Image (cartoon, rainbow, N blue to C red):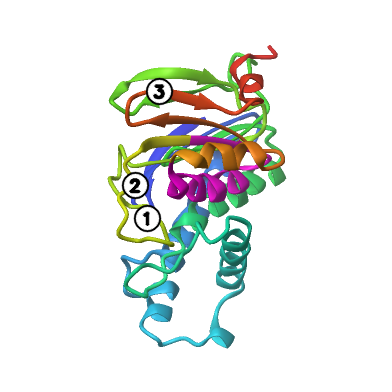
Amino acid sequence: MKDTRAIMGMPITIEVRGEGAREAMESAFAYFQSVDERFSTYKDTSEISQINRGELVESQWSDDMCEVFAIAKRTMAESDGYFNIRRPDGSIDPSGVVKSWAIKNAAELIAKAGCADFFIDAGGDIAVSGTDENENDWSIGIRNPFKRDEIVKVMYPKGFGVATSGSYIRGAHIYDPHDPKRALDEIVSITVVGPDVLEADRFATAAFAMGPRGIRFIEKMPDLEGYMIDRNGIATMTSGFGFFTTSTS
């Protein structure tokens, strides 16, 4: 059972195998929709928009909002300030946490429904479990940022989470919190693999903001691996990334 829907301003693809697949998939899509209603900075009625307008004080925030803010605060500390959900204009945009946080939660919903084999891809951030319809390891392709219909590396997440940060699809939407006016043009993408998609994504964003030294930051982080492509098309990977380029099936 597989479907793709536009939610949260991006295509979300969910594939689920096994008994109860349809119900599990619909539950996951409904969850993504509820997250969008709460966290979209483009919806005037969302909770985050109300917070940015000063209409809600912290004691009025939902548990979900408090959880996302706590993750953002922790990531900011762990990345030496290179991850920051406060924009240069002073507003708060938690999308750097929310997408992968929602993917992780949706994956848990599907697993709790009894489906062990599934694939979720929300805007390039990915969570997988089990095997595909051919009972092989799920595989994904890292796109060539200079030729988007070309795959430069095939990888097998093997149950880990995968997230990619870059400028080649959405443009310059990531900035260096330490120097907001600095152009982040030395690298074009960095793909990070972590214990789950949330861990991969929060550090992928921070690593991209660091520029070329971001891949060294990922190398030093426990349980993370990465694959970076610079503006000259040269790829650099961490020492353990090779594990994810071979299938176990």
Q: Earlier in the sequence, mark 2 or mark 3?
A: 2
Provide residue 169's location: percent of width, then percent of height. Answer: 30, 39
Q: Which of the pair 209/123 is nearer the observer?
A: 209
Classify mark 2: residues with Cα within 10 Å, few (<14), some (14-19) or many (20+).
many
Q: Which of the pair 165/120 is nearer the observer?
A: 165
Reading the image, the residue beneath label 2 is 184
Image point (47%, 48%), residue name:
210
Q: Earlier in the sequence, mark 1 or mark 2?
A: 1
How many numbered marks does the figure carry? 3
Which label number is shown at residue 234? Answer: 3
Residue type of the residue flagged with mark 1: Tyr
Horizontal side of residue 36 vs 44, given as left or right: right
Decide whether residue 164 is among the magenta residues: no
Separation (CA) of disc 1 from disc 3:
22 Å
Image point (58%, 68%), residue name:
64
For the residue labelled by badge 3, is the local secondary structure a helix, a strand or a loop?
Answer: loop
Magenta span covers which residues? Answer: 191-211
Residue type of the residue flagged with mark 3: Ile
